[in-house]
């Protein structure tokens, strides 16, 4: 390299500085894990697909709490890839709106700079965000029916974009449940009716808080009137179609929910239909009422039976379970009152130790029986249970109670020597091999009686308690009798090569024997219950004899 001359060195020293010719970095990338950070109000935006569009009923209470205490529960935030602003991740849009109000009113710095937990943008993006907001809104104040319906409709769009195909209502219900927002398919159907047919006509009424039951009645009325219209309008040259007529009539009643009457809607709609169709009002009203009743019976959820529980016959092998909190029965023949009498109270006070001991024993038996109905545990979380309770309250439904339903003794088969009040539960007094064999053999004989082959079933001290003896002319038996006898012989698993029964034929006869469709009658409902009970007792018997059973007959037996 040549030596620099003084002139060259002076030129280099006097040259302009280095210039940046690469792109500048405007901001750092977002964290890849949950990270606490402080953001300002101008950096944060509400979630644009938030299902809540009306004011939170608890808005003022939340605002008063934040003004006095500050933000006890800062919202979780996230950011879409490539966007400049953060957004609320799941629940917190109401708190964000309150913070903006308080900042404009007070200019207090605590309402402007918010400590938040940043969570990375989820892999499934909008679906996870929307279902999270649906669940959080249910827990923190509830949504109106139409808000929930619109949120579910938006979730359906996201799911279809994710999968690339249209979803049925059942599949939508399954995916919502998997993402933490359980919703029955029947409710999704009502929500779609509300969005498609009711919201364009009565937005004020729906956003004002019209409930599920009134929405359901309007949906049923619309379908009943539409069927009647289609049937009566055949061959008629009408100036309006039913969809337009329904919207015009319904829009007249777009008021506040307190002043709404579905009956007035029905009267007005039937009146205009009668005028356009040239039909008598009363005739049309009766026709629509009948159609509406049938539609409601098909679409509504079955109501739980409140009738008194039938008594188990005296010879029952299953004792009815103890109710969760039974009152002490009176000693006299009088009808049991809702409150204990003075005599009962005195008796209870005189023997508190005995009563407490008895209650503890009963509770122990109840818990043992409850565990006996649990074949496999169902995975759940406290959060999921809370969401389910909130949704049920909003929908006016009753969540199933396993502890109550599992122990409710409903006699499913009251005839026979050993009536069955509970197919699954095995009483402690029955849970020994000898007694199990006696019951199994009796159930086998009663099943065989339906085919007039009870004489071919004989008790046995080994096996599962019975064996089948085929008559000499087994091929002359009717097909139903031969199928029943072959099934029982296969269940007893006794090696009898010379019975004359064709075990290979059982595969062809089994479907017709159990659920019908063959050339001979199927097993009766009572016989099917006895068969289930026989199988349950036989499984328990084999477990006891192989030493594989636990102390509780319900666990995997």
Image (tube, rainbow, N blue to C red):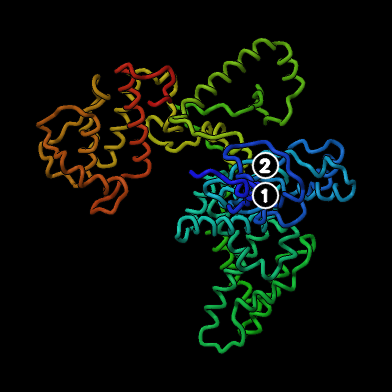
Which residue in the protein does label 2 denote?
76
Quadrant in the picture for residue 111: top right
Q: Does residue 391 appear anywhere in the picture?
A: no
Q: Whole-percent x and y of residue 160? A: 49, 58
Q: Residue at x 77, y 21 (%)?
A: 342
Which residue in the protein does label 1 denote?
14
Q: Nearer the viewer, residue 223 or 471?
A: 223
Q: Residue at x 39, y 20 (%)?
A: 431
Q: Nearer the viewer, residue 278 or 217?
A: 217
Q: Nearer the viewer, residue 188 or 234?
A: 188
> Is residue 336 rendered to the left or right of residue 292?
right
- Which is more N-terminal, label 1 or label 2? 1
In front of the other: label 2 or label 1? Answer: 1
Q: Does residue 115 appear anywhere in the picture?
A: yes
Q: Residue at x 37, y 19 (%)?
A: 549
Q: Residue at the bottom extreme?
A: 237
Q: Whole-percent x and y of residue 331? A: 65, 21
Cα distance between the residues tagged 2 and 1: 55 Å
Question: In which quadrant is the C terminus drawn?
Answer: top left
> Is residue 261 rendered to the left or right of residue 290?
right
Q: Whole-percent x and y of residue 181? A: 58, 46
**Which SS class for mark 1?**
loop
Mark 1 nearby-residue class (10 Å; few <14, some 14–19, many ≥20): few
């Amino acid at each position: 390299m040549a030596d620099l001359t003084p002139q060259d060195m002076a030129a280099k020293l006097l040259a302009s500085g280095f210039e940046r010719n690469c792109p500048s970095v405007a901001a750092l990338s977002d964290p890849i894990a949950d990270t606490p950070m402080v953001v300002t109000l101008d950096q944060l935006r509400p979630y644009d697909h938030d299902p809540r569009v009306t004011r939170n009923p608890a808005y003022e209470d939340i605002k008063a709490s934040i003004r006095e205490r500050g933000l006890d529960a800062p919202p979780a935030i996230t950011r879409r890839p490539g966007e400049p602003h953060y957004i609320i991740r799941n629940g917190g849009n109401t708190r964000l709106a309150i913070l903006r109000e308080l900042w404009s009113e007070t200019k207090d710095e605590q309402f402007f700079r918010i400590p938040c937990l940043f969570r990375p943008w989820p892999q499934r993006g909008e679906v996870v965000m929307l279902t999270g907001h649906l669940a959080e809104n249910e827990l923190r104040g509830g949504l109106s029916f139409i808000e929930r319906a619109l949120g579910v409709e938006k979730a359906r769009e996201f799911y279809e974009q994710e999968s690339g195909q249209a979803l049925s209502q059942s599949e939508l219900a399954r995916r919502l449940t998997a993402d933490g927002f359980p919703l029955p398919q029947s409710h999704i159907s009502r929500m779609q009716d509300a969005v498609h047919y009711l919201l364009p006509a009565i937005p004020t009424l729906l956003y004002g808080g019209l409930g599920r039951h009134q929405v359901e009645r309007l949906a049923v009325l619309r379908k009943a009137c539409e069927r009647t219209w289609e049937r009566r309008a055949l061959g008629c040259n009408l100036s309006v179609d039913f969809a337009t007529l329904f919207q015009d009539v319904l829009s007249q009643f777009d008021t506040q929910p307190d002043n709404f009457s579905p009956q007035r809607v029905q009267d007005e709609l039937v009146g205009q239909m009668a005028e356009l169709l040239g039909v008598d009002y009363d005739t049309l009203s009766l026709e629509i009422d009948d159609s509406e009743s049938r539609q409601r019976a098909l679409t509504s959820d079955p109501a739980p039976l409140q009738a008194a529980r039938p008594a188990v016959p005296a010879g029952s092998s299953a004792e009815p379970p103890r109710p969760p909190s039974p009152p002490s029965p009176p000693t006299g023949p009088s009808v049991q009152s809702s409150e204990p009498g003075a005599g009962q109270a005195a008796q209870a006070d005189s023997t508190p130790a005995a009563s407490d001991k008895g209650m503890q024993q009963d509770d122990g038996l109840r818990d043992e029986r409850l565990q006996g109905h649990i074949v496999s545990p169902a995975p759940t979380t406290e959060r999921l249970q809370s969401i389910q309770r909130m949704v049920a309250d909003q929908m006016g439904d009753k969540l199933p109670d396993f502890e109550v339903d599992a122990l409710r003794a409903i006699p499913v088969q009251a005839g026979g020597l050993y009536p069955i009040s509970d197919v699954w539960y095995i009483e402690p007094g029955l849970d020994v091999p000898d007694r199990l064999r006696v019951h199994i053999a009796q159930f086998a004989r009663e099943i065989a009686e339906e085919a007039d082959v009870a004489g071919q079933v004989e008790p046995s001290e080994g096996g599962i308690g019975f064996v089948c003896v085929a008559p000499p002319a087994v091929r002359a038996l009717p097909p139903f009798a031969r199928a029943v006898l072959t099934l029982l012989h296969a269940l007893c698993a006794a090696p009898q090569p010379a019975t004359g029964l064709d075990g290979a034929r059982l595969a062809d006869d089994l479907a017709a024997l159990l659920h019908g469709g063959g050339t001979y009658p199927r097993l009766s409902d009572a016989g099917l219950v006895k068969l289930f009970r026989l199988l349950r007792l036989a499984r328990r018997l084999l477990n006891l004899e192989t030493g594989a059973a636990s102390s509780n007959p319900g666990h995997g037996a």
